[in-house]
Image (cartoon, helix red, strand yellow):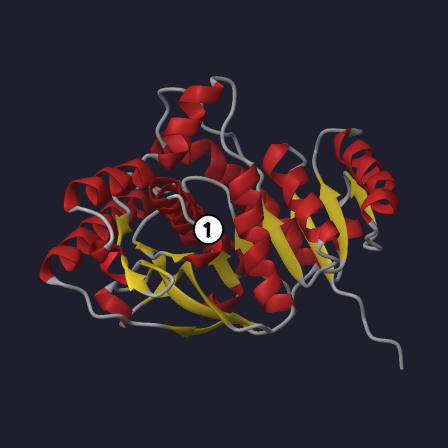
Amino acid sequence: MALKKSKITVVGAGFVGATAAHWAASKELGDVVIVDIIEGMPQGKGLDLRQAAPVEGFDSRVFGTNDYKDTAGSDIVIITAGVPRKPGMSRDDLLAINTKIVKEVTENIVKYSPDAILIIVSNPLDAMTYVAHKVSGFPANRVIGMAGVLDAARFRAFIAMELDVSVEDVNAFVLGGHGDTMVPLPRYSTVAGIPLPDLLPADKIEAMCKRTANGGAEIVNLLKTGSAFFAPSASAVEMAQSMLRDKKRILPCCVYCDKEYGVGGYFVGVPAKLGVNGVEQIIEIKLTPEEKAGFDKSVAAVKELVKALPI
């Protein structure tokens, strides 16, 4: 009996969406559908990727469409649709317009892929993940926000740059909401197993934590006409890979927490095990009073956003 090939849909053919399709296809995670409302854009990018396949040697089929019918039966759906941040714009400013977009996208996905796992990339991330969960009616284990993997990757990159070591040896954790209140955890961050506080002075670590929290804004300010897309898309695909291949990796993700960490029914960034069933376990780690205070502040910011949602 032939094995069924996985199907991945990427909603949004902009920089994040097209690059996510690129990563997913090049890793041969399955066939990839790019869907967007702009006629020609997903088709063109899909065709371009198909023509890259002989060069890079991947056999994932990629195609673009404007019709959600073509996304039917997707195993994973990565939602990148939405308006990106512009210089001077906070993630919160995006709330109203992106709520409408994510609601419409989610309704279309549910119609054609009722068993899919959703990975949300649209900002403001924690609130948009809440919207997708509420609109989809999916169980919480099948709706996950991409935040912590990206934030941790930024932290890991800064650590590797500072110490001049391989990124492969650097592990880092970031908790809380995806925004200025996120909580990098130096105590749980290591280089080849060595705790970060044993390698760098407190002031250097504090500077990297601040740079991590402002990582997205730093790139927005540099680009001037757009926002980050390489690292966000790679992060979403790393999550997809863990689930499609049932790797059960423990990654920092925006997931539904109720009793966990005393959150009380919101989507926030915590360590989670990702497998074929989506979120298979939430890992609760011990926090110092200072870390817990930072986490609670971050959760409070997420709650304020959710309260302001126009749904």
Q: Depth check: 273 or 189 in front? A: 189
Location of the N terminus (image quadrant) = bottom right
Identify the element where label 1 is drawn: helix
Residue highlighted by disc 1: 167
In percent of width and height, residue 300 lies at: 21, 50
Q: Quick check: 274 above or below 292? A: below
In percent of width and height, residue 50 lies at: 85, 43
Q: Quick check: 190 above or below 227? A: below
Report whether residue 173 is seen: yes
The furthest residue to the front: 164
Residue in the picture at 84% in, 46% down? 53
Quarter of image, res 268? bottom left
Q: Quick check: 125 above or below 30? A: above
Residue in the picture at 31% in, 58% down? 189
Residue in the picture at 30% in, 36% down? 211
Q: Depth check: 64 or 232 in front? A: 232
On the rendered structure, is 32 left or right of 53? left
The furthest residue to the top: 224
On the rendered structure, is 271 left or right of 54? left
Please rate how many residues cluster around mark 1, counting C-alpha atoms within 10 Å: few if below 14, some from 14 to 19, many from 20.
some
On the rendered structure, is 308 left or right of 105? left
On the rendered structure, is 136 left or right of 17? left
In percent of width and height, residue 101 lies at: 55, 38
In percent of width and height, residue 167 lies at: 46, 51
Residue in the picture at 43% in, 48% down? 153
Q: Depth check: 107 or 188 in front? A: 188
Location of the C terminus (image quadrant) = top left
The furthest residue to the left: 289
User: For the residue marked with disc 1, what is the amino acid?
Assistant: Val
Quarter of image, res 197? bottom left
Report whether residue 146 is seen: no
